[in-house]
Image (cartoon, helix red, strand yellow):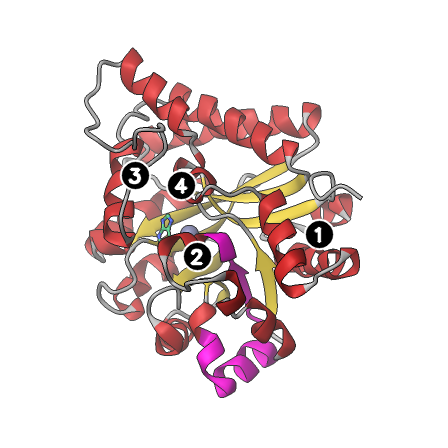
Amino acid sequence: MSWKDLPKVELHLHLEGAAPPAFIRDLAKEKNADIGGIFDERGNYAYADFAEFLKVYEAATSVLTTPADYARLTRVVLEECAAHGVIYAETFLSPDFCGGGDVKAWWEYCAAMAEVAEGAEKDLGITLKGIITCIRHFGPEKARAPAECAAETAGDFITGFGMAGAETVGKPGDYAWAFDCAREAGLRLTCHAGEWGGAQMVRDTLDQLPGIERIGHGVGASQDGALMERLAREGITLEVCPGSNIALGVFRHWHDHPIEKLRENGVAVTVSTDDPPFFHTTMTREYKKLNEVFGWDEDDFRSLNEDAIAAAFCDEATREDIL
Ligand code: ADE
Ligand code: ZN
């Protein structure tokens, strides 16, 4: 059995964060754009910690300035996903980076990406859905425009809304307006929490933002038995990204990662790459590591993917097609 060919479902993937460094370097050259020293001597993204990671991420993203750039990026990312056996993916999209939150501009970006996704479904056999994100460290006021963009374009391609960025900024309830707006438009909800903010941030997110179905990362919940019980009882799925957590220093070693503990406590976990080139990972590598470190076998991955499909932000017809 080849780890690469094993069918995979990925629910937590930032489109800009999946941009290969060479793609960003070439685009910067084409546009004569100075993006500063964001690469190391081997050409990889260079950052020392999470704060620097966010800065490098935003600098790289700054060369993506047109719907055509996003269309090209979407194709490159989908080819890479498909090469690693991914048959269904959900990607985070940020109107802040696509037209600055202007609804009219966002429509064009969104249409460009949706068209590429449609093509890839036909020729690569991969289905892609988009989850619009606001960025927490941009503040609650700036979260309104992405939510309005999300509400406007909710449909077959845009199926969810969420929040990424530095979870140390403010509290989840500060962003309730944006989440209410998206929920009222029929979008499904997820939110990054408990990557850095521990169990309390996961609890606050669920308490302060009604209707959240999934938590991005959520690994902090493993410190709290009552919270794990609550996640299991309420059917909240965690979008766990082990390789990201190790690369960013949330945990030192793969052996320290709590994904197995969460699973043992009945929490629905899924596995994703988050920002693969930043963390030198792929879905194949994540699976291989989980096999090496925790002994997960084909049956474990089958059940992992069933949980992921059950938690996917797509309609029943799509879910049945993928299974
Ligand atoms: N945006 C991209 N990657 C992220 C991460 N790991 N945490 C928070 N925001 C992000
Ligand atoms: Zn993320």
User: What amino acid is found at the position of numbered circle 1 in the picture?
Assistant: Glu
Front residue of 58/245: it is 245
Residue holding disc 1? 316
Residue occupying the far bottom of the picture: 226
Task: Name the residue type under label 4.
Answer: Phe
Q: Which residues are magenta?
A: 221-243
* Mark 4: C-beta under 8 Å from nearest atom of ligand 1: yes
Amino acid of disc 2: Ile
Badge 3 is on which residue? Answer: 46
Relative to the observer, which residue lies in front, 147 or 268? 268
**Is most of the magenta stretch helix, strand or loop?**
helix
Earlier in the chain: of badge 3 and badge 2, it is 3
Labels 4 and 2 touching (C-beta < 8 A): no
State the mark number for residue 278.
4
Q: Residue at image x 30%, y 33%?
A: 40
- Pointer 2 local density, CA inside 10 Å: few below 14, some 14–19, many at least 20: some
Residue that mark 2 sits on: 246
